Amino acid sequence: MNTEDMLQEAERILRLNDKGHYTVPTHGLYPFQWNWDSCLTALGQFRLSPDRAWTEVETLMAHQWPDGMVPHIVFHERDEGYFPGPDVWQTGRPTPTSGITQPPVLGMVLEQLFLRENPDHRSESRCRSLVQAAARWHDWFYRCRDPQGTGVVALLHPWESGRDNSCDWDDALAQVPTEGISPYQRKDITHVDASQRPTAFEYDRYVALLECFRALKWDNTRLHDASPFQVVDPGFNAILIHSELALSRLAERLGDKALAHRLSERAARSIEAMDTLWHADLKQYACLNRRTGQRVNSASVGGLLPLLVLPQGHEHVADLSGRLADWLDKAPFGVCSMDPLDKRFDGKRYWRGPSWLIVNFLLITGLRQCGQTELAHRVVQASLQCIQKSGCSEYYHPMTGEALGGGTFTWTAAMVIEFLSMDDSQALLSA
Ligand code: 9WN
């Protein structure tokens, strides 16, 4: 596939999965709107139609909860092909939604959409209300997921991380009681081979957490303290801070100086708090189990994502870049989701080894910001090689580039459009 073919294929997939005002990640396996999928998809959509890109995020934000939370799934239509559907969540929203959230990439995406528009025809009022809504979501995070005011927020469910079965959650998830959960039938393994998906042990705990929160009527003033799973993830917090800084810059440009100031102050505090997650032995960031107070000895890609917020020359940039380069030497098809030398690494199983283009994109963004441009180029190239070899799949075996998970995948296609629009991606491909 040459770059022109890749671009055409990516555009075809965005159209194939377009439901008019939102996009499904892929038909069959994920037949609804997902939070961070939609936001990242908007970046690719922008190149086809700026108006369509704004609509994608506006549709998501139209389903923000009154308390500020933005749900991880919006169930626009009935579809029996996915578990757990709206009847399991029972969140009582006018349009059914799930009751948990996902990585807040919205802020960074809004800034990109805004900057990419022709300055003479900018959608200022659309952007202004989205910035206000996104800021309310961030306030919700710090109010409901950091009630002690530590500066870093906790995940209450692995699905919130977007990296569902990452090894990072293994210990905390094992502590989640499953007695009395309702019987259920998974649908994911009717679409994708079970060897590429989470295990039954993990699903039981995903359902147990859902039922625990449902019993609390999705009251976010109670969920955090009641949850048997509370993990502080450096990757998730880095995304939140990166978006917070983007929102602050946008608020400044749009004339809301008070908001800009409030967000940048909070971001500065959170960067300091995130630094307590540095793991000197692993030479990267790592999670904290807030329930037990213990550090999590797990070297996943989440611990490299703080590259998104570290300034050039920060003492940890060299360590993180070194690890990333080392992983690429061992597995050249994108950045592994788990340290390839870890005994739990599994190149086929979802977030326990495979590479994901959206994570590669976040790392590239961070690397460029930290001045690591050569390494960023290497990740672009590694990502496009997956596409050349296997098309737009959900994820890839990082050692072989084999397509894994769902096919004709929306956010992967959007990332292809992003990568191909970056300087010198063409030259890199033919190198
Ligand atoms: C649960 C849609 C979503 C992504 C997540 C990915 C996967 C869902 C699932 O698919 O999660 O949210 O059922 O496996 O892990 O990151 O947003 O593409």
Image (spheres, helix red, strand yellow):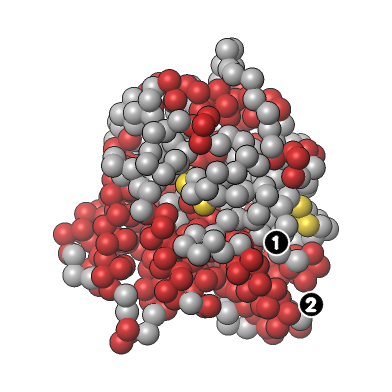
Q: Residue at x 50, y 40 (%)?
A: 160
Q: Nearer the viewer, residue 66 or 305?
A: 66
Report the side of 301 relative to 390 (left or right).
left
Q: What residue occupies the far left of the structure in this picture?
A: 258
Report the side of 283 relative to 222 (left or right).
right
Q: Amino acid at mark 1?
A: Thr
Q: Is residue 368 visible?
A: no
Which of the labelled discs sits on residue 351, or is there none? none
Q: Amino acid at mark 2?
A: Met
Relative height, residue 141 to residue 211 (above, below): below
To which residue does mark 1 refer?
408
User: x%, y% of residue 275?
Assistant: 43, 45
Quadrant of the rendering where the C terminus is positioned: bottom right
User: x%, y% of residue 314?
Assistant: 45, 59
Quadrant of the rendering where the N terminus is positioned: bottom right
Which of the labelled discs sits on residue 1, or is there none? 2
Q: What residue occupies the far front of the structure in this picture?
A: 78
Alpha carbon of mark 2 to alpha carbon of mark 1: how far? Answer: 15 Å
